[in-house]
Amino acid sequence: MEFEKIQSKSLGEVLYRGVHKSGLKIYVLQKNGFSKSYASFAARVGSVDSEFTVPGESEKTKVPDGIAHFLEHKLFEQPDGSNVFEKYSKTGAWANAFTGFNTTAYIFSATGGFYENLEILLDFVSKPYFTDENVAKEQGIIGQEIRMYDDDPNWRVFFNLLSAMYVSHPVKKDIAGTVESISRINKDILYKCYNTFYNPSNMILFACGDVDCKRVEQLADKYVTASPIGEINRHYPEEPPRINQSVSEQRLSVALPIFLLGFKDSELKQRGGDMLRKQITTEVLLEMLAGKSSPLYNTLYEKGLINDSFELDFSSETDYAHTVMGGESTDPEAARAIILKQMREAKLLPDDFQRCKKVLIGRFLRLFNSVENVSNTFVSNIFKGIDIFEYPQICEQITLKEAQDRKESHFTEENCAMSVVRPFG
Amino acid sequence: MSIKSIQIKNGINVHYIETKKFKTTTLGFYFRRPLSRGEVTLNALTANVLRRACPLYPETALLSKRLDELYGARLDAGVRKKGDMQIIHVNFEFANEEYIGKSQAIFENILLLAKSMVTDQTGFCANYVNQEKDNLRQRILALINDKKSYAHMRCIEIMCEAEPYGIRELGFVEDIEAIDEKILFRHYKNVLLSSPVDIFICGDADIDFAVEFLKDAFSRIETSQTKYPENVIVKEAGEVKKVVETENIAQGKLCLGFRTKTRATDENYPAMVIFNELFGGGPSSKLFNNVREKLSLAYYVSSKMDIFKGIMTVGSGIEVENFQKAYDEIMLQLNEVKKGNVTQAELSAAVKATVNNIRSMSDSAIVTEDYWLSRLITGTPWDFEEYCGMLQKITAEQVVRAAQDVTVDTIYFLKGKEA
């Protein structure tokens, strides 16, 4: 296979990318001077993939909520009854996996023996082993994971917000599913999901560190074989632009209320550079409107309506996107009223625009300080067709007019839902 | 990654960790204070008020704009508990000029800002102090939100009731009210005059310039050296304390506190570190493989060591009715190690995982700073490789011998209200 070398002179970073004969996309971000090297073997499947058509079948397949996450846990199981951690324990690598809305990634970081660890990674992800017994055992463990999140106010307030924003899109569902939904998972459904989504053409291998791409290719030759299955048809229910409900409330054991405001995005269906442009436009706008130097942030802080826990985030996929902001507040309704009013009335000034762009550039640079963060960011963006090396350049190009237009269309009261977790009365 | 320490004054040292691998540079100030009821709340509040403003940027919004201009430089201030000591820290992280154009004098501007904020404060604004009093009150009350860390904190409070370590580093709600801007500013002056200070710089910086600058910044401060008592290491666990508390929650949180009776300077300290990893450190540990994988009782179960106090804690989230089962299994696994049931594979896994964790620390500036701060405080100034070398020599016999010193002191369980 041919590797294309992409250099970012300003960042001082070099990335190699190519497509393996199996269809697997391989990326190597060469980083010297770090003790760790890192690899992520990721499949484009997550909690939103609850309904799809298996290539070659005519019937739609509907799977229990939480299946992608369950599958992630179960891949660690080995045919001899051991788990993969035993293999990694011989190398000392730190290994883990995570399931998101759209991605499942198997990762390790190691301060030595990169290729030995890469073999373990490629081997186990390519060899599923599910039995009735090991599925039953996992239901107990994941049941406790779900119970743990049930008590986590920050997790709950976020998922309640998603439920308030979305009418039917599966992004509103908990990633791990429910104790009830995972009780319906069995080994046959797991194999069906595995065979559909864990196909090299639906996966990425991303390596970061002092890594040689040719040796990565050789290991891919050994462990990853092509099994062309054709296009996976993913079915998402039609999602209306309107929010589902304006307020969601829950009571939990917390000291003071936690609130999140969500702005549902209706400018969708982009990929690649267009999507990145929307992302950066929204980020710079958020920084101007509600960043730490904004009048809004300082008003809320000085009135005691927010504290240090206040956060801003914009998250974007082809079929859904939203801005989320919030944190602890003594009076979420008052905070909401001020946020909506000041955002509506805010004038976007050129000086603030330039200053906030600098904040974004600094934040982007910081990403490259961590082999984990930079790799995970690359992986999720690659699935969206985005080349994040373009970030500084696009950031430079965005005009105040674009930010202004985005503000008018995205940050409206109609798009806004609120989720609150309150203390028990 | 080595460390170069330069004394700029009696009790004030600059530590330079030189590396080109990061795109940013860090500058951190760490003031060592004794952890005590008398000043814990004042220290926590001081950190929060310091970062609100300084003579150069007397309003928070102006200060935030300045940080934005410096390519989103980060400012963080707070307190950290290190054994029986409380650290007040002020940290900056900012872009290396290399990546944004050499003409940008970021480092110099950060030093000017840091000087204004850390050594040149002339008084605290009453409004800011009042706002931060409210915030601190909220933060202390909000400790209940994260049940896992709350259970750990309660276990330590109960276990170390008679030691400074039992004090929460954020302080006490009931001590906040009496503080005003004058009292707090007086306290800040006292902190400046009487605390040993460690200043860390990590990255690729003009260290000679920085040292000269910091010498000047601290030149007007006449420090009177204060010696702090060493960390107390309790050698006898005494009668086991058992406390069960109730909250409105779904999953029970168990936290066990153990005395290891081991100080970082003790000969068997490296063996105790390996024992902790083998017993409950990660996915190759006895706790993970038995409590989680074999018995399916928990999603998380792990142990961790506090190097200052010779304390180990085990935390796990379980169904309330499984309390006894989980407790028995944790104690059974401890006894297995005590009886000598440690395989070569388990030992090797524990050593390799620990070494990997330590070497990984060097890839984060803030983690590296914290590592060195702890090493300096405990009087064990080993660099990463020196420390790894000690751990790699540990034998199964040494681990088993270390386990004999481990005794349970406190059993804490946070459970849900019965329906």
Image: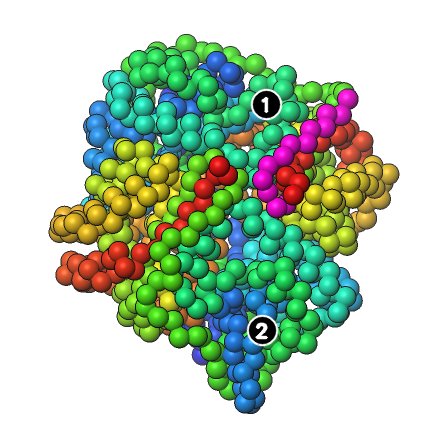
- For disc 2, the neighbor class at 10 Å (few under 14, some 14 to 19, many from 20) is some
Element marked by disc 1:
helix
Contact between marks 2 and 1 (CB within 8 A): the answer is no
**Residue tagged by mark 2?**
A63
Query: Chain ID for label 2?
Result: A
Residue A226's x, y, as percent?
57, 83
Amino acid carrying mark 2 in the image: Val
Amino acid carrying mark 1 in the image: Gly
Q: Is residue A360 shown above or below B394?
A: below
Element marked by disc 2:
loop
Report which quarter residue B293 is drawn in: bottom right
In this rendering, would A227 be left or right of B48? right
Q: Is residue A201 shown above or below A33?
A: below
- The magenta stretch is B239-252
Residue at 74%, 44% (x, y): give it.
Answer: B321
Q: Are marks 2 and 1 on the same chain?
A: no
Report which quarter residue B10 is drawn in: top left
Residue B126's x, y, as percent?
27, 20
> Split into 4 quadrants, where in the image is the C terminus of chain B?
top right
In this rendering, would A156 be left or right of B107? right
**Residue tagged by mark 1?**
B166
Report which quarter residue A112 is drawn in: bottom right
